Image: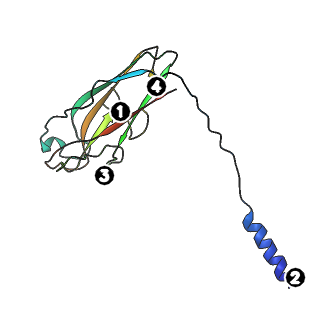
C-alpha cells in the first residue's frame, strides 16, 4: 500500500510541473493623431478582358490610392494596413465579393512601386511624418487562376497606426 501511494504521489508531482514565463506588453497613448484624407472611398477598377487575367499572377488595371496626413503634431511615423475578406485561393489578396463574381480574380494592394505587395492585414512600409505626410499605394485586379467573366468588388478596410 505504501509503495502504491509513493508511486501515485510521484506521478502527481511529475504532472503538475509546468514552465512559466512572463510577457510584457508595452504601448503609448497619444492625445492627438493626424487628420487623414484618403484619395478615394470608392475606386472604379474598370472592365478587363478575361484573357488579360488568363493565368494566376497576371494583374490588370492599376489604380492609385493616396493617404494624406495633416496636423500630425509631434508624430513622426505611421503605418497603414489593409484587411477585409481574405481570398481563399491566395490569402495575401482581398476576395472578390461581388454579386455574380468573376471567378479566379482578387484584389492586390501594392506599395507605390506597383510591384511590392502589401500583405493582407500586415502594415506597409513606414510613412515619415513631419506635421504632414503622404503615402501612395497601387490596387490591382489579380488572377488567382484563369479568370472567368463576372462582376468585381472587394471591400477593404484600412487601419493606421502611429509609431
- Nearest to N terminus: mark 2 or mark 4: 2
Q: Can you identify the residue that label 1 sits on?
A: 116
Q: How far apart are the alpha carbons under marks 2 and 3?
A: 62 Å
Q: Quarter of the image containing the N terminus?
A: bottom right
- Nearest to N terminus: mark 3 or mark 4: 4
- Nearest to N terminus: mark 4 or mark 1: 4
SS of the residue at dot 2?
Answer: helix
Q: Can you identify the residue that label 2 sits on?
A: 2
Foreground label between 2 and 3: 2
Q: Can you identify the residue that label 3 sits on?
A: 89
Within 10 angstroms of label 3, few (less than 14), some, or many (20 or more) residues?
Answer: some
Foreground label between 4 and 1: 4
Q: Can you give x and y, in whole percent of width and height, for residue 16 in the image?
A: 74, 64
Q: Which residue is painted at 29% across and 46% down in the image?
A: 95
* Quadrant in which residue 60 is drawn: top left
Q: How far apart are the alpha carbons under marks 2 and 1?
A: 70 Å
Proximity of marks 3 and 4: CB atoms separated by less than 8 Å:
no
- Nearest to N terminus: mark 2 or mark 3: 2
SS of the residue at dot 4?
Answer: strand
Left or right of 124 in this view: 107: left
Nearer to us in this view, 50 or 163: 163
Q: Can you give x and y, in whole percent of width and height, for residue 82 in the image?
A: 37, 36
Q: Which residue is painted at 38% across and 23% down in the image?
A: 36
Within 10 angstroms of label 1, few (less than 14), some, or many (20 or more) residues?
Answer: few
Q: Can you identify the residue that label 4 sits on?
A: 78
Foreground label between 2 and 1: 2
Q: Which residue is painted at 16% across and 45% down in the image?
A: 151
Amino acid at each position: 500500500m505504501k509503495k502504491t501511494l509513493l508511486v501515485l504521489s510521484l506521478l502527481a508531482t511529475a504532472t503538475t510541473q509546468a514552465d512559466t514565463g512572463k510577457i510584457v506588453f508595452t504601448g503609448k497613448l497619444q492625445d492627438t493623431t493626424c487628420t487623414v484624407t484618403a484619395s478615394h472611398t470608392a475606386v472604379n477598377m474598370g472592365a478587363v478582358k478575361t484573357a488579360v487575367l488568363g493565368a494566376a499572377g497576371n494583374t490588370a488595371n492599376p489604380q492609385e490610392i493616396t493617404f494624406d496626413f495633416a496636423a500630425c503634431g509631434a508624430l513622426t511615423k505611421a503605418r497603414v494596413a489593409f484587411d477585409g475578406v481574405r481570398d481563399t485561393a491566395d490569402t495575401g489578396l482581398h476576395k472578390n465579393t461581388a454579386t455574380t463574381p468573376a471567378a479566379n480574380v482578387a484584389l492586390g494592394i501594392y506599395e507605390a512601386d506597383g510591384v511590392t505587395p502589401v500583405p493582407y492585414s500586415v502594415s506597409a512600409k513606414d510613412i515619415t511624418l513631419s506635421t504632414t505626410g503622404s503615402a501612395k499605394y497601387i490596387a490591382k485586379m489579380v488572377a488567382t487562376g484563369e479568370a472567368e467573366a463576372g462582376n468585381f468588388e472587394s471591400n477593404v478596410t484600412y487601419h493606421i497606426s502611429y509609431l
